[in-house]
Image (cartoon, helix red, strand yellow):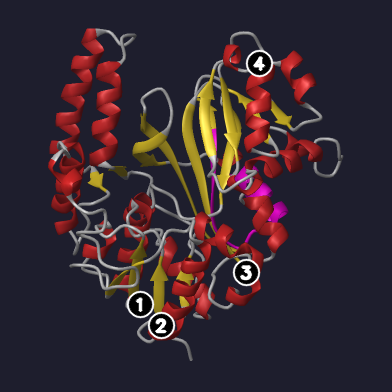
C-alpha cells in the first residue's frame, strides 16, 4: 500500500514562492521532499520541510539536464516529480519515459494545448462556431490569432487606442526563447513589428485589454474527478496597473467557477490548473485571460483557507483515498510582502498619474497591513517562519550594489549541479 512516509517527491523550481508552498504542504504531510533549482540560493532549500536540496543544470542545456534528472531519479529513488512548465516542455519529446513520475497529463497533444496560450484561444474561438461548444467561445477578450497568413488582416483590424497584450509561447518559438506576455500600444504594432515577432515565434496572440480586477479559479482534477477547487480575488497587483498578484483574498463567484470548470473538463487536463479572469464589479462581466497548468504564485492562500492542493494532488497520484474538498474559508487574505507588496507600493509611488494623496494612502495601507495579525503572509508560515527573514535578506541583497561581486568567478560560490545545496 502506498504511504507518504516512504514516498520521495522531487519539487522543481525551489526558488519560486509557489514551490515553497508545495514543499511546506508535502513536508508537513509526511512526504520526503527533495527541493531542486538551478539557483544555489533557492529559498525552498532552507525550508524546515525540505529533506534534501539539489542544484541542477539550466534547462537550456537539455542534454545535461536530462542526464542529471535521470541520475537523480535513480540515486534518490524519486517516486513523484512536481513539475513546472519548463520541465514539461523540456521532457516533451520523450515525456512517456517519465509518465509514471509526473502527476499530470502526459499526452503530448494535451500538454501542447494546455501550455500554449495561442492554441488554447484558437480552440476556444473555434468552439464559438460549434453549437454544442458555443459557451466556450464566450467570455473571451477580443483576440487576434497572428501567424504569417493572418498578419495582414490583423494589422487592419487592430484598434487605434485600446491597449493590447502580446502573448507568445515558448512552444511556438523559432528557437529556444521563452514565453512572453507584454502590454503594448497599437502604435507599436506595425508591419515591421509583426514580421520581427513572426521571425521569433511561429504564431502568437494579441488581446484587447479588458477592464476589471484580477480573479482566479483553481482546480485539482484527477482521473476526471474534481478533487479540490478554490477562487480568489486580487487586491494588489505588480505593477499596480495589472500584473501578478501580491495581495489577494479568498472569494467566490459561481458563474466564473462554472465557466472555468467547463473549460477544464473540455480540455481534459489532469492535475492542478488555474484560470485567470478579469471581472468588472460594476457590470459583473468577466473575461478569461489565460490558463496555467501548473502550480501558481498564490498557492499559500488556499493553504491558509483550508484547501491543501499539493497534498491532495500527490495523495491522489500515488493512490491514497482522497475526499474531495468542496468548501473553503472566504474570510482569508494573504500577502507576498516582499518582493511583491514592496514592488506594488513602488509602482504606485513612481506613477505620475497617481495623486499625491493616494500615494500617501498607499504608504499608510502598507504599514497597516504589515501590522495586522489577521492578514496572512506567504513566508510567515507556521513551522517555517525563518524563511520570512531569509526572504527579506535575499530581497535586500538583490537591491545591494554588486560591484565587489564582479571580481568573483561566476561559479565561485555555487555548488556543482547535483550537489547538496547549503542549508
- Residue 190 image label: 4
As measured in the structure, the alpha-carbon distance from the residue carrying label 1 to the one carrying label 4 is 53 Å
Q: 42 or 230: nearer the eye?
A: 42
- Residue 95 image label: 3
As measured in the structure, the alpha-carbon distance from the residue carrying label 1 to the one carrying label 3 is 24 Å
As measured in the structure, the alpha-carbon distance from the residue carrying label 1 to the one carrying label 2 is 6 Å
- In the rendered image, the residue lying farthest to the bottom is 1
Q: 191 or 168: nearer the eye?
A: 191
- Residue pointed to by mark 1: 31
As measured in the structure, the alpha-carbon distance from the residue carrying label 4 to the one carrying label 3 is 39 Å
Q: Earlier in the sequence, mark 2 or mark 3?
A: 2
Percent x, y of residue 399:
19, 36
Q: Are marks 1 and 2 in contact (CB under 8 Å)?
A: yes
Q: Are marks 2 and 3 in contact (CB under 8 Å)?
A: no
Q: Earlier in the sequence, mark 4 or mark 2?
A: 2
Rendered residue at 87%/40% (across/down): 131
Q: Earlier in the sequence, mark 1 or mark 4?
A: 1
> Which callout, 4 or 3, points to the residue nearer the camera?
4
> Which callout, 1 or 4, points to the residue nearer the camera?
4
Magenta-tinted stretch: 257-277
Q: 207 or 248: nearer the eye?
A: 207
For mark 2, does the 10 Å Cα neighbourhood hold few (<14), some (14 to 19), or many (20 or more) residues?
A: some
Rendered residue at 59%/9% (across/down): 161
> Which callout, 4 or 2, points to the residue nearer the camera?
4
Left or right, 367 with respect to 84, comes to left
Amino acid at each position: 500500500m502506498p504511504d507518504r512516509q516512504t514516498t520521495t517527491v522531487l519539487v522543481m523550481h525551489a526558488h519560486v514562492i509557489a514551490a515553497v508552498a508545495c514543499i511546506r504542504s508535502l513536508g508537513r504531510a509526511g512526504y520526503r521532499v527533495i527541493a531542486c533549482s538551478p539557483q544555489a540560493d533557492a529559498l525552498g532549500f532552507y525550508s524546515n520541510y525540505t529533506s534534501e536540496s539539489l542544484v541542477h543544470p539550466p534547462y537550456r542545456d537539455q542534454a545535461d539536464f536530462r542526464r542529471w534528472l535521470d541520475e537523480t531519479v535513480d540515486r534518490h529513488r524519486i517516486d513523484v516529480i512536481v513539475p513546472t512548465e519548463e520541465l514539461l516542455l523540456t521532457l516533451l519529446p520523450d515525456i512517456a519515459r517519465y509518465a509514471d513520475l509526473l502527476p499530470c497529463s502526459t499526452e503530448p497533444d494535451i500538454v501542447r494545448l494546455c501550455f500554449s496560450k495561442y492554441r488554447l484561444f484558437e480552440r476556444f474561438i473555434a468552439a464559438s462556431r460549434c453549437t454544442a461548444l458555443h459557451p466556450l467561445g464566450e467570455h473571451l477578450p477580443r483576440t487576434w490569432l497572428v501567424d504569417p497568413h493572418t498578419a495582414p488582416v490583423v494589422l487592419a483590424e487592430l484598434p487605434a487606442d485600446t491597449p493590447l497584450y502580446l502573448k507568445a509561447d515558448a512552444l511556438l518559438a523559432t528557437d529556444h526563447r521563452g514565453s512572453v506576455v507584454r502590454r503594448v500600444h497599437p502604435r507599436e504594432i506595425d508591419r515591421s513589428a509583426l514580421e520581427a515577432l513572426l521571425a521569433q515565434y511561429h504564431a502568437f496572440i494579441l488581446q484587447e485589454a479588458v477592464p476589471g480586477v484580477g480573479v482566479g479559479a483553481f482546480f485539482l482534477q484527477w482521473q476526471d474527478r474534481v478533487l479540490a477547487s478554490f477562487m480568489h480575488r486580487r487586491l494588489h497587483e505588480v505593477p499596480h496597473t495589472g500584473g501578478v498578484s501580491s495581495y489577494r483574498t479568498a472569494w467566490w463567484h459561481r458563474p466564473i467557477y462554472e465557466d472555468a470548470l467547463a473549460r477544464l473538463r473540455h480540455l481534459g487536463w489532469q492535475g492542478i490548473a488555474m484560470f485567470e479572469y478579469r471581472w468588472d464589479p460594476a457590470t459583473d462581466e468577466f473575461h478569461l485571460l489565460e490558463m496555467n497548468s501548473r502550480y501558481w504564485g498564490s498557492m499559500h492562500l488556499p493553504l491558509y483557507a483550508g484547501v491543501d492542493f499539493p497534498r491532495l494532488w500527490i495523495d491522489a497520484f500515488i493512490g491514497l483515498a482522497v475526499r474531495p474538498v468542496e468548501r473553503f474559508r472566504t474570510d482569508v487574505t494573504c500577502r507576498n510582502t516582499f518582493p511583491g507588496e514592496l514592488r506594488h507600493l513602488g509602482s504606485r509611488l513612481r506613477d505620475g498619474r497617481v495623486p499625491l494623496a493616494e500615494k500617501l494612502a498607499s504608504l499608510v495601507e502598507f504599514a497597516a497591513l504589515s501590522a495586522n495579525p489577521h492578514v496572512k503572509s506567504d513566508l510567515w508560515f507556521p513551522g517555517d517562519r525563518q524563511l520570512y527573514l531569509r526572504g527579506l535578506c535575499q530581497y535586500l541583497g538583490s537591491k545591494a550594489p554588486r560591484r565587489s561581486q564582479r571580481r568573483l568567478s561566476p561559479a565561485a560560490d555555487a555548488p556543482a549541479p547535483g550537489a547538496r545545496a547549503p542549508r
